[in-house]
Image: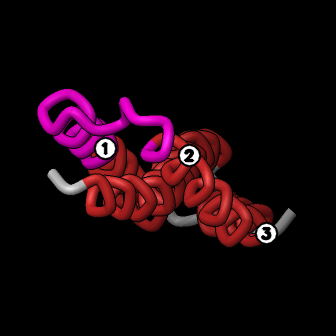
Amino acid sequence: MNNLAAVIICAIWGMTATILFFKAWLAFLGVLAGMIGLARGRNPRMTVLAHLYNSFTNCAFCSAILVFIFVLLFRVGGMGRAPLEVAAFWIAATVGLAVTLPAIPAKIDELWTKTNGED
């Protein structure tokens, strides 16, 4: 594969992997909040169960996509060995982190409110 194409693919994957990781992590936190919500019983059980199911499937899907694409690109495709590819991945991942990170606290609060009500 062309070196420029490999660098571009690694950069795109760097940003995408960061966003998928945070989506999977937030979904995992949603599963935890849902279990706490079931135990506390403040919201209707079916609402919390629906949220729990949604969070679990999002967590599983995002995690599976992360693993699949990492294996496909780096084990099967042989990418990530050249220093420029690694640098492109990490620079793009840092940009993805800077874009995603500011919204995380509000999303965590939203997860808690959906499953446990207002505290």
Q: Secondary structure at mark 1?
A: helix
Which residue occupies the foreground of this view, 94 or 53? 94
Residue depicted at x 38% and y 53%: 10
Residue 51 % position (x, y): 44, 61
The quadrant holding residue 13 is bottom left
Which residue occupies the foreground of this view, 68 or 111? 68
Q: Marks 3 and 2: which is nearer the front?
A: 2
Q: What label does residue 60 carry, if any?
A: 1
Q: Secondary structure at mark 3?
A: helix
The answer to whether any part of residue 34 appears in the image is no
Q: What label does residue 102 carry, if any?
A: 3
Q: Secondary structure at mark 2?
A: helix
Who comes first in sequence, dot 3 or dot 1? 1
Q: What label does residue 87 carry, if any?
A: 2
Q: Main secondary structure of the magenta part?
A: helix
Give the side of residue 26 with respect to residue 85, left or right: right
In the rendered structure, does residue 90 fall within the stretch colored magenta?
A: no
Q: Amino acid at mark 3?
A: Pro
Who comes first in sequence, dot 3 or dot 2? 2
Q: Marks 3 and 1: which is nearer the front?
A: 3
Who comes first in sequence, dot 2 or dot 1? 1
Residue 40 % position (x, y): 67, 45
Q: Which residues are magenta?
A: 65-85
- Mark 2 to mark 1: distance in Å? 28 Å
